[in-house]
Image (cartoon, rainbow, N blue to C red):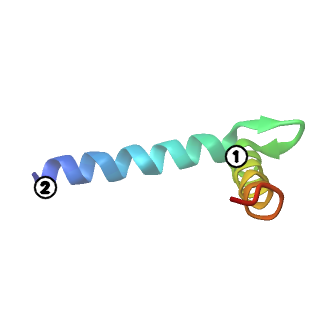
Amino acid sequence: MAEWIVWFLALIQTTIQWLSTMEILGVPLLWVIIAASLLCLFVRVFLIRP
């Protein structure tokens, strides 16, 4: 079980490093994903009221 946890953490670390190095118009892809997620969250909270 410990090997699976180590493997999963290594996968997450590798993915974050890859997203940090990939760029779209000079902006790291990780920040693009974070900004899009926050924008969707704000639209859902403030504009779409249940």
Identity of the residue drawn at 73% across and 55% down: 44
Identity of the residue drawn at 71% across and 57% down: 41
User: Which secondary structure lies at badge 2?
Assistant: helix
What x and y, as percent, mark residue 38?
73, 58
Badge 2, how many Cα within 10 Å: few under 14, some, many 20+? Answer: few
Identity of the residue drawn at 34% across and 53% down: 9
Q: Which residue occupies the extreme left position in the image?
A: 1
Q: Which residue occupies the extreme right position in the image?
A: 25
Mark 2 or mark 1, whichever is nearer to me: 1
What residue did someone put label 2 on?
A: 2
Badge 1, how many Cα within 10 Å: few under 14, some, many 20+? Answer: few
Q: CA distance from mark 2 to mark 1?
A: 30 Å
Q: Are marks 2 and 1 in contact (CB under 8 Å)?
A: no
- Of 39 and 44, the residue lying toward us: 44
Question: Does residue 24 appear to the left or right of 12 in the view shown?
Answer: right
Residue 6's disc is none
Quadrant where the image shows the C terminus: bottom right
Q: Earlier in the sequence, mark 2 or mark 1?
A: 2
Q: Residue flagged by tag 1: what amino acid is it?
A: Ile
What x and y, as percent, mark residue 34?
70, 54
Q: Residue flagged by tag 2: what amino acid is it?
A: Ala
Identity of the residue drawn at 22% across and 53% down: 5
What x and y, as percent, mark residue 22?
70, 37
Q: Is residue 15 above or below residue 34?
A: above
What residue did someone put label 1 on?
A: 33
